[in-house]
Amino acid sequence: MNIYDSANKLEQDLRASSEVAELKLAFEAVKANDLAYKLFDKVQNEQFALQQKQMQGQEITDADIEEMHKLTDQLQNFSEISNLMDKEKKVDSMMQESNKIISKPIAEIYQG
């Protein structure tokens, strides 16, 4: 069997998983709440800007950090976003476990 066929099958299985379906529904709920979605989008853009700043060797200031804290604190006011974060954690956990399984042959080379 071709490894890429297996990877494509895994992708299909992930799409069909309850974890990914629940994540999709949770994100749709965030998008349905205009205020929650705007704030979510703003936080994502701010995170990206800080990452870019860091990658360019620029200092992240206390003001940058404070602004990010204010935004993330506001996120907690929306149950839709809390639910989304919970579903993201479940998908992340599944992905980490899957990665451990997939990486096992390589890990065994270095362990033995």
Image (cartoon, grey):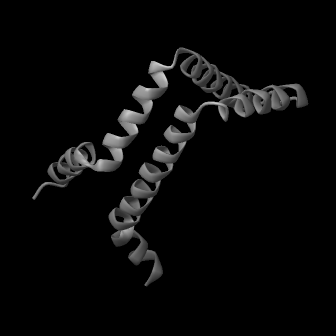
Quick one: which residue is furthest to the right in this view?
Answer: 62
Indicate the quadrant where residue 67 lies.
Answer: top right
Is residue 95 found left or right of 86 in the rendered image? left
Is residue 60 found left or right of 52 in the rendered image? right
* Residue at position x 57%, y 20% in the image: 41
Quick one: which residue is furthest to the bottom in this view?
Answer: 112
Is residue 98 found left or right of 5 in the rendered image? right
> Could you tell me how many numbered marks the image carries?
0
Quarter of the figure that contains the N terminus: bottom left
Rendering coords of residue 93 (x, y %):
46, 57
Q: Nearer the viewer, residue 98 or 19?
A: 19
Above or below — where is 79 with respect to 102?
above
Above or below — where is 36 with respect to 104?
above
Rendering coords of residue 23 (x, y %):
40, 40
* Residue at position x 80%, y 27% in the image: 58
Quarter of the figure that contains the C terminus: bottom left
Rendering coords of residue 92 (x, y %):
46, 51
Q: Nearer the viewer, residue 30 or 4?
A: 30
Is residue 102 found left or right of 65 in the rendered image? left
Rendering coords of residue 40 (x, y %):
59, 25
Indicate the quadrant where residue 108 lies.
Answer: bottom left
Quick one: which residue is furthest to the left in this view?
Answer: 1
Q: Nearer the viewer, residue 62 or 88?
A: 88
